[in-house]
């Protein structure tokens, strides 16, 4: 819980009352490697803070998993569109390792925002950070070569190859595993 409290405190002032409300509102949950935190077609009812482990969001394309993002310790994860719009998710969230997460329901998240203006500031800052990353990443992505995409991926996720199967990295980059192996050999 301390990592979560620290993460929030880095972005907004946390009074003792707010800290207590956060501790009460977030619940510790554990998942095993390959478990689904959320399945495509279901509503994202929770926002998760990763205390330990690595996950990825993916969607199915002709029966193949296509990774859309990776998440690891001290980050928040959910199906962002589903969580904020209250519509079913178009992606699945899968644990790539055993995970220890703190989750908060959408309802409790909104209650903290209303009851604690400082938490509302945190929620806005979190949404802005996620939007900025996704916007920057998606706009640059279309114009990059496979090698440039790999370099950018490693900027956002240093040493990702140590934690994620190369097939998932290749699917994220939109290239074959063989092409990824050639790019990695050029490093």
Image (cartoon, helix red, strand yellow):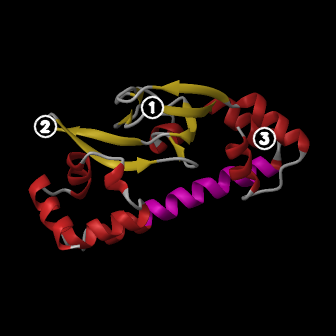
Instruction: Tell me if label 3 and label 2 are in contact, CB under 8 Å.
Output: no
Q: Which mark is residue 62?
A: 2
What is the C-alpha distance between the residues marked 1 and 3?
33 Å
Mark 3 vs mark 2: give the one in front: 2
Percent x, y for residue 63?
A: 15, 33
Q: Is residue 179 above or below residue 113?
A: below
Percent x, y for residue 46?
A: 56, 31
What is the C-alpha distance between the residues marked 3 and 2?
42 Å
Percent x, y for residue 162?
A: 34, 51
Instruction: Tell me if label 1 and label 3 are in contact, CB under 8 Å.
Output: no
User: Is residue 84 magenta-colored?
Assistant: no
Q: Quadrant of residue 114?
A: top right
Q: Is residue 97 left or right of residue 61?
A: right
* Residue labelled with disc 3: 114
Mark 1 vs mark 3: give the one in front: 1
Disc 3 crowd rating (10 Å Cα; few below 14, some 14-19, many 20+) is few
Circle 3 sits in a helix, a strand or a loop, which is it?
helix
Q: Quadrant of the N terminus?
A: top right
Disc 1 crowd rating (10 Å Cα; few below 14, some 14-19, many 20+) is some
> Where are the magenta residues, as a range?
118-135
């Amino acid at each position: 819980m301390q990592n979560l409290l620290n993460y929030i405190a880095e972005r907004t002032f946390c009074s003792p009352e707010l800290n207590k409300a956060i501790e009460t509102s977030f619940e510790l949950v554990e998942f095993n490697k390959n478990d689904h935190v959320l399945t495509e077609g279901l509503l994202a009812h929770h926002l998760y803070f990763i205390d330990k482990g690595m996950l990825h969001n993916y969607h199915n394309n002709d029966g193949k998993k296509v990774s859309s993002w990776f998440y690891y310790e001290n980050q928040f994860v959910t199906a962002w569109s589903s969580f904020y719009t209250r519509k079913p998710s178009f992606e699945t969230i899968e644990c790539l390792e055993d995970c220890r997460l703190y989750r908060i329901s959408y309802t409790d998240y909104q209650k903290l925002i209303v009851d604690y203006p400082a938490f509302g500031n945190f929620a806005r800052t979190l949404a802005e950070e996620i939007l900025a990353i996704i916007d920057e990443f998606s706009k640059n992505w279309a114009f990059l070569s496979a090698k440039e995409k790999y370099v950018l991926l490693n900027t956002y996720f240093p040493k990702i190859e140590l934690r994620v199967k190369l097939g998932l990295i290749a699917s994220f980059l939109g290239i074959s595993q063989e092409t990824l192996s050639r790019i990695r050999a050029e490093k």
